[in-house]
Image: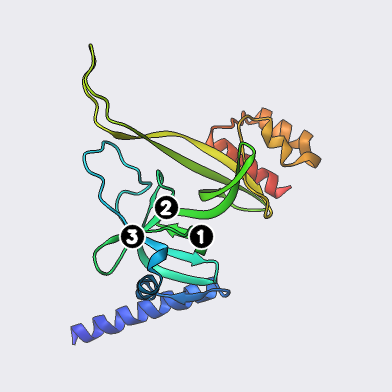
Amino acid sequence: MKNILCIVFFSFLFSSNTLAQAYLFPNYEIKQAMDFYHFNRSEMERFAEVLPEKQIDGSPYLNEEFIEGSIFTTSKNLYVSIPLRYNIFNDQIEFYSNEGRAYAITVPEIIEKVVIGEYHLEYIPYQQAKKIRRGFFTIVVEGNATLYKRQIIIFEEEKKAAAFKDPQPPRFIGKPDKFYIRTGLDAAKPINKTKDLLKFFPDKNDTISNFIKNNKVKSNDENSLADLIRFCNSL
């Protein structure tokens, strides 16, 4: 009897979650992890098996372990309850299949948004120097103006022993996060210095300039930038 009650309870919980998701995201068709795995089998060219990193110090991941998450696709499908992680170095979303293997989505253009635990990432165009590229960004503040964070990890080759220096194994090294602002459908633009913030709101320069000064906003400080963007979106 207890087993039957447990099955009924979890079935009710599963149905409730699905209904809640359908209510929250009415424009998306809600699908489960198994649907994604079946899609995976039929679209293998979109995925590449992830090989384990061996004898490399550090980590290329935002989240080392796979965390249950969701994938929003450009075709308006919402796949839920998929074990996911984000490889910062490769700028790829990886998923753990029901076959016990890790795969990377190699054609991210199918992705609109990814939720991995507390992290919300979008695949968007962004400006780098004079070129427009696309990549995954973590959402910090969402609104008319959206503040994004771009995590950066580099790979450093192995260094052999030298005079007065010990050998060093290959390693992944985290660099300071880079912040971007995006308005509308334009490419996200980097914030290199505090004055860059005024370019996004030319009709409110005086108000925003005062806020920056009074609140000591810095271009590399996530919390103060988040406060500023919330303030700008409220104007």
Judging by the rendered image, the residue that carries numbered circle 2 is: 92
Could you tell which of marks 2 and 1 lies nearer the N-terminus?
2
Residue shown at 63% from the left, 31% from the top: 215
What numbered label is drawn on residue 103?
3
Q: Up-down: is 141 above or below 129?
A: below
Q: Residue furthest front?
A: 45
Name the front one of labels 1 and 3. Answer: 3
In x, y percent, where is residue 4? 22, 86
Q: CA distance from mark 3 to mark 2?
A: 10 Å
The residue under label 2 is which amino acid type? Gln
Q: Up-down: is 177 above or below 142?
A: above
Res 53 quadrant in image: top left
| Mark 3 burial class by Cα count in 10 Å: few <14, some 14-19, many 20+ | many
Could you tell which of marks 3 and 2 lies nearer the N-terminus?
2
In x, y percent, where is residue 137? 51, 48
Q: Residue furthest top?
A: 164
The residue tagged with tag 3: helix, strand or loop?
strand
The residue tagged with tag 1: helix, strand or loop?
strand
The residue under label 1 is which amino acid type? Lys
Judging by the rendered image, the residue that carries numbered circle 1 is: 113
**For this view, does 94 lie left or right of residue 190?**
left
In x, y percent, where is residue 131? 62, 42
